[in-house]
Image (cartoon, rainbow, N blue to C red):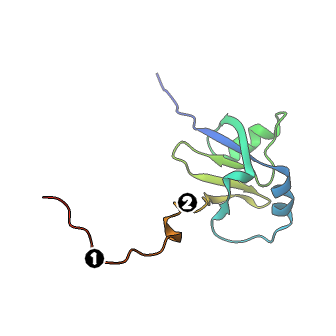
Amino acid sequence: MLCFYVPVFKIHRMKEQPRQSFRWAAHTAGAASVKPKDYEPGGEIEASSPYGAWTIAQSSETPLWVGDLLEDAAGNLRICKYVGFEEARWVLPEVRSGIENLPPAAGAPVPLPA
């Protein structure tokens, strides 16, 4: 008995406002930097590759559009562009604790109790 594993891709749908900017932006080489705030969950799709997922989705009620992302089980992202699928990476906002705005400590260090 043969068992075949078919990968499952998570779909991340680009929101409409960022999609308009993305559609008219110049094509760039290399991994695309994408922001999680520009996307919303779009379900999952089983396919052998991103291109297989695109083919399946095109015949559904919710096709993939330029700017949409596919995420594999390992967390790798592929963004749908006019030229095909290309690598993408999440750009996460820098987390600040607030301590960076405090003045530096002055004086000698306080010894720890023995």
Q: In this figure, which residue is indicated by the disc labeled 2?
A: 95
Where residue 80 is drawn, which disc sits there?
Answer: none
The C terminus - image quarter: bottom left
* Circle 1 residues within 10 Å: few <14, some 14–19, many ≥20: few
| Residue 47 placement (x, y as % from top left) | 64, 38
Q: Which of 62 and 98 is in front in this view?
A: 98
Instruction: Say if 66 sits above or below 56 in the image.
Output: below
Instruction: Say if 33 sits above or below 65 in the image.
Output: below
Residue type, numbered disc 1: Ala
Which residue: 65% across, 63% down? 33
| Residue 22 placement (x, y as % from top left) | 81, 62
Number of the front mark, 2 or 1: 1
The answer to which image quadrant residue 85 occupies is bottom right
| Residue 74 placement (x, y as % from top left) | 51, 46
- State left or right for residue 47 relative to residue 13: left
Q: Nearer the viewer, residue 94 or 67?
A: 94
Which residue: 73% across, 44% down? 40
Counting residues from the start of the chain, the first of labels 2 and 1 encountered is 2
Instruction: Say if 64 sits above or below 29 in the image.
Output: above
The answer to which image quadrant residue 6 occupies is top right
* Circle 2 residues within 10 Å: few <14, some 14–19, many ≥20: few
SS at circle 1: loop
Q: In this figure, which residue is indicated by the disc labeled 1?
A: 108
